[in-house]
């Protein structure tokens, strides 16, 4: 734990500074399970601090691999540590200020993605209080979001939440289980210059309980769907989105609105991409395995390679369309790479650590999303102010 809480590796999680990296990469290592322990499994990972993970190899002749990230959470780290030190608080602040933000968990099945986002199985669905211990990052973020809002009494906020699942490139509304029979379409909006899901159920959330109810309902519906289909949850992505509209009354009664959002994404198991890579199949052929996960990998690889900018294949999958604004344009992304500590998971662990190291190279400047009209009014107002100031000096 000392390594994860090392001051130098915390990152500046609470400061709002658009010049910082727009992707923050942290690693969470889950504890060895009872079952693994009883099979005599041991950990192959070491944490020297400063955001580093050392991965020892299985044979003494092979050299250990060293990876470094913004923060590494060791197996003893608590759910509260993830909220405090992952940088998610900066994302929440930015969502309130009008940026598009995404926090996603990446890793093989069983590495702790769902645990990190929503806690142990059944906790949310059981209707536990939002303040119950054990809750994951999503519920803790909801609580923090309402704290941030209460600190800004000069603004009026409107929150809207939606919760969907992408399974086999079909978008299913987790708040409307009937949509499993008739998947929803992802479309481009000229007006807001972004992708959206047509007919997605969106809930106005005035209180913390409203947000929590959305999560609970969606998780229950997901469990029902998963029961009907084998290995469903390891092959699907879930995306919970909270839109934050802020109306701020400027001088002279002008109301300026910003439109921020935060997505929480629980990705399909990363072992799903392997089959396509190993047979060298093209994106087209990957269609039925897990296109969204593969394309996300391509997008991240291209984004981190500055020279290839402009050819980022967001349009090639449902998930990347929906995350495009936070990955590139006007957003900030937090990647939580989840890994298991044991020998039997070593090759998947190294794949995840590599993927995460590549993501860390992405840089782009986030911008606030505002209504075009509001942006124009604001810029004209600033111009008038500048002219008035100039006049005073004459
Ligand atoms: P994934 O969603 O990546 O497939 P899960 O989140 O379901 O993995 O985790 C697999 C199992 O390990 C679950 O039983 C989960 O509760 C447990 N687990 C994962 N991470 C932790 C952790 N940090 N502390 C305690 N148990 C964990
Ligand atoms: Mg899971």
Image (cartoon, helix red, strand yellow):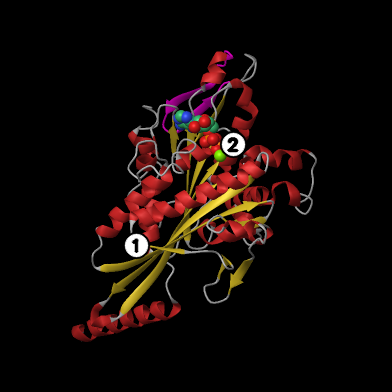
Q: Secondary structure at mark 1?
A: loop
Question: Where is residue 145, by image quadrant?
Answer: bottom left
Question: Where is residue 354, by image quadrant?
Answer: top right
Tell me, yes or no, whether the highlighted magenta stretch contains residue 327: no
Q: Which residue is mark 1?
A: 206
Disc 2 crowd rating (10 Å Cα; few below 14, some 14-19, many 20+) is many
Q: Residue at x 33, y 50 (%)?
A: 144
Position of residue 275 relative to residue 331, above or below, is: above
Q: Which residue is mark 2?
A: 352
Position of residue 193 relative to residue 328, above or below, is: below
Position of residue 45 relative to residue 170, above or below, is: above
Residue 327: x and y in percent read 53, 56
Disc 1 crowd rating (10 Å Cα; few below 14, some 14-19, many 20+) is few
In this view, the residue in front, 54 or 341, is 341
Sequence order check, earlier mark of 1 and 2: 1
Q: Residue at x 56, y 44 (%)?
A: 223
Question: Where is residue 149, by image quadrant?
Answer: bottom left
Q: Is residue 131 left or right of residue 251?
A: right
The boundaries of the magenta stretch are: 39-56
Q: Residue at x 80, y 40 (%)?
A: 279
Residue 284: x and y in percent read 77, 54
Q: Quadrant of ligand 2?
A: top right
Total labels: the figure holds 2
Residue 267: x and y in percent read 58, 45
Q: CA distance from mark 1 to mark 2?
A: 38 Å
Q: Secondary structure at mark 2?
A: helix
The disc label shown at residue 338, or none: none
């Amino acid at each position: 734990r000392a390594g994860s809480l090392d001051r130098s590796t915390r990152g500046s999680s609470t400061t709002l500074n658009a010049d910082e990296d727009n992707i923050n990469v942290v690693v969470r290592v889950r504890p060895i399970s009872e079952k693994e322990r009883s099979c005599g499994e041991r950990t192959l990972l070491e944490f020297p601090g400063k955001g580093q993970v050392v991965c020892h190899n299985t044979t003494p002749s092979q050299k250990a691999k060293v990876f470094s990230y913004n923060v590494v959470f060791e197996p003893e780290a608590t759910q509260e540590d993830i909220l405090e030190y992952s940088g998610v608080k900066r994302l929440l602040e930015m969502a309130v200020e009008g940026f598009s933000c995404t926090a996603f968990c990446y890793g093989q099945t069983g590495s702790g993605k769902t645990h990190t986002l929503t806690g142990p199985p059944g906790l949310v669905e059981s209707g536990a209080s939002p303040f119950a211990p054990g809750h994951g990052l999503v519920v803790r973020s909801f609580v923090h979001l309402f704290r941030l809002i209460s600190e800004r009494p000069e603004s009026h906020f409107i929150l809207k939440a939606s919760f969907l699942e992408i399974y086999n490139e079909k978008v299913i509304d987790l708040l409307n289980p009937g949509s499993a029979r008739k998947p929803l379409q992802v479309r481009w909006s000229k007006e807001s210059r972004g992708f959206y899901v047509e007919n997605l159920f969106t809930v106005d959330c005035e209180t913390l309980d409203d947000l929590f109810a959305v999560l609970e309902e969606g998780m229950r519906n997901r469990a029902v769907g998963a029961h009907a289909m084998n290995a469903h949850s390891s092959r699907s992505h879930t995306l919970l989105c909270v839109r934050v509209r802020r109306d701020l009354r400027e001088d002279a009664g002008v109301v300026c609105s910003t439109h921020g959002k935060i997505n929480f994404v629980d990705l399909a198991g990363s072992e799903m991409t392997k089959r396509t890579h190993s047979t060298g199949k093209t994106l087209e052929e990957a269609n039925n395995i897990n296109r969204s996960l593969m394309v996300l990998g391509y997008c991240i690889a291209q984004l981190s390679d500055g020279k290839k900018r402009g050819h980022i294949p967001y349009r090639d999958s449902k998930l990347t369309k929906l995350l495009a604004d936070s990955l590139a344009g006007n957003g900030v992304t937090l990647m939580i790479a989840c890994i298991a500590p044991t020998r039997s998971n070593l090759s998947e662990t190294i794949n995840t650590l590599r993927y995460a190291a590549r993501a860390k190279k992405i840089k782009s400047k986030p911008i606030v999303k505002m209504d075009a009209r509001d942006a124009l009014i604001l810029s004209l107002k600033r111009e008038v102010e500048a002219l008035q100031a100039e006049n005073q000096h004459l």
